[in-house]
Amino acid sequence: QKEVEQNSGPLSVPEGAIASLNCTYSDRGSQSFFWYRQYSGKSPELIMFIYSNGDKEDGRFTAQLNKASQYVSLLIRDSQPSDSATYLCAVYTGNQFYFGTGTSLTVIP
Amino acid sequence: GAVVSQHPSRVICKSGTSVKIECRSLDFQATTMFWYRQFPKQSLMLMATSNEGSKATYEQGVEKDKFLINHASLTLSTLTVTSAHPEDSSFYICSAPGGTSGAPAQYFGPGTRLTVL
């Protein structure tokens, strides 16, 4: 079992819709959770992090964490074509970082 | 804050030559840095963990004699691809943990695109 699992996609949503990206992790003791965005040909950039159960909002982005279910998600409201990218979920266990393989998102104009 | 730079951004070399890639943490110190490789349309692959003042830790299947890592200071790690061959052509990315203590995030450099002819 991989430490961090993501649906590889591709996920396609129309412009203006909500994009929902999901991630599960295996280490119940994981402490911190991160979402990165990677445009084609570029390196990943950090867009959100969350430590506590519940929701954390930053502009059009909302990260949701459910430690009991070992599940973290990213919602993108009012999706724009510029949001088209690969989204990586990452988990910090206190000792190591683990990255998912990423979900490819395409926002259709 | 938490900016990581890489140099060069792009390099083209002949087969058999060695290429050095630098990774610097610009506004924070990093005792640990990570080197990744990414082939087109594939996910990040962790190659090695660079440790300041000690030997790097390599992932299974990564040749340590081919990919030399030196963590010379708290802000600089270098990756040298020795005797590069066309199959080494890839996107090399470094990262360093930064942010608040106890809850670090990985910050990535912009990457180095290596093309071996």
Image (spheres, rainbow, N blue to C red):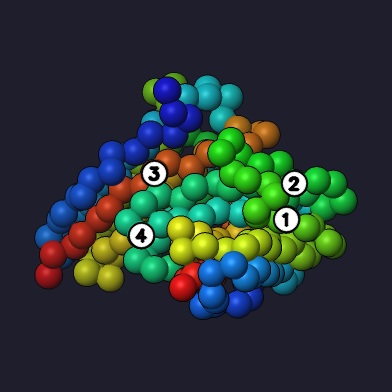
Q: What kind of element bears circle 2? A: loop
The residue located at (21%, 60%) in the rendering is: A106
C-alpha distance separating marks 4 and 2: 26 Å
Using the rendered image of the protein, determine whether residue A72 is visible from the camera's viewpoint.
Answer: yes
Q: Both on one chain, marks 1 and 3?
A: no
Which of the two labelled residues, at mark 4 and mark 1, occupies the earlier sequence position? Answer: 4
Local crowd size for mark 1, using a 10 Å CA cut-off: few (<14), some (14–19), many (≥20): many
Residue at horizontal 54%, vertical 76%? B13
What separation in Å lies between label 3 and label 4 (alpha carbons)?
Answer: 13 Å
Q: Which sits in the foreground, B72 or A38?
A: B72
- Residue identified by numbered label 2: B56
| Three-letter code for the amino acid on which mark 1 is drawn | Ile
B49 to the left or right of A105: right
Give residue B40's mark.
4
In this rendered view, identify the residue nearer to me: B78 or A40.
B78
Q: Is residue A103 above or below residue A5?
A: below
Residue B85 image point, x, y percent: 52, 62
